[in-house]
Image (cartoon, rainbow, N blue to C red):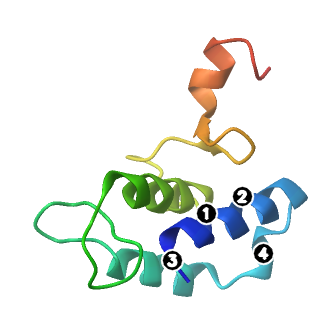
């Protein structure tokens, strides 16, 4: 399991409308264990080095889990981009 694979599973479940099939709180807790408290970035697994790639997938996954909605924008599960950006570009209605 890695933050990248959690995104793959979460985005697929979101597309299917089945995010309720996972333990939201347990997954949020696991993703947060991957965060480096000094830099704020995320790694693939708890204790590993952080990088931009896994930080993107961790934050996108947290967005799909509706975690901290005041600070994280809604991510589209198909395009892996902010919904507001896709709407502004005319991709989403």
Task: Verify CB contact (< 8 Å) between mark 2 and mark 1.
Answer: yes
Q: Which mark is residue 20?
A: 4
Residue 74's x, y, as percent?
Answer: 58, 43
Name the quarter where the C terminus is drawn: top right
Please tell me which residue is depicted at 62% across the width and 13% down the height of the picture: 88
Task: Verify CB contact (< 8 Å) between mark 2 and mark 4.
Answer: no
Say whether residue 79 is left or right of residue 34. right
* Circle 1 residue: 7
Q: Is residue 31 above or below residue 17?
A: below
Residue 78's x, y, as percent?
Answer: 75, 43
Residue 80's x, y, as percent?
Answer: 62, 43
Going from N to C along the chain, the mark reached first, 4 or 1, is: 1
Q: Quadrant of residue 81?
A: top right
Q: Around disc 2, counting alpha carbons within 10 Å, would you say few (fewer than 14), some (14 to 19), or many (20 or more)?
A: many
Say whether residue 61 is left or right of residue 33. right
* Circle 2 residue: 11
Q: Quadrant of residue 32?
A: bottom left
Please tell me which residue is depicted at 59% across the width and 26% down the height of the picture: 84
User: Which structural element holds mark 2?
Assistant: helix
Q: From mark 2 to mark 4, how far is it between C-alphas?
A: 12 Å
Say whether residue 27 is left or right of residue 18. left
User: Which structural element holds mark 3?
Assistant: loop
Q: Give the label, 3 or 2, closer to the camera.
A: 3
Task: Verify CB contact (< 8 Å) between mark 1 and mark 3.
Answer: no
Q: Around disc 4, counting alpha carbons within 10 Å, would you say few (fewer than 14), some (14 to 19), or many (20 or more)?
A: few
Q: Which mark is residue 2?
A: 3
Q: Which mark is residue 78?
A: none
User: Which structural element holds mark 4?
Assistant: helix
Going from N to C along the chain, the mark reached first, 3 or 2, is: 3
Q: From mark 4 to mark 1, how far is it between C-alphas?
A: 15 Å
């Amino acid at each position: 399991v890695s933050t990248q694979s959690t995104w793959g599973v979460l985005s697929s479940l979101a597309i299917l409308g089945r995010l309720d099939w996972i333990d939201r709180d347990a997954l949020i807790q696991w993703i947060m264990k991957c965060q480096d408290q000094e830099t704020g970035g995320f790694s693939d697994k708890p204790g590993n080095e952080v990088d931009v790639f896994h930080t993107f997938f961790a934050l996108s996954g947290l967005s799909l889990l509706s975690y901290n909605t005041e600070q994280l924008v809604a991510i589209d599960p198909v395009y892996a981009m902010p919904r507001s950006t896709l709407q502004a570009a005319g991709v989403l209605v």
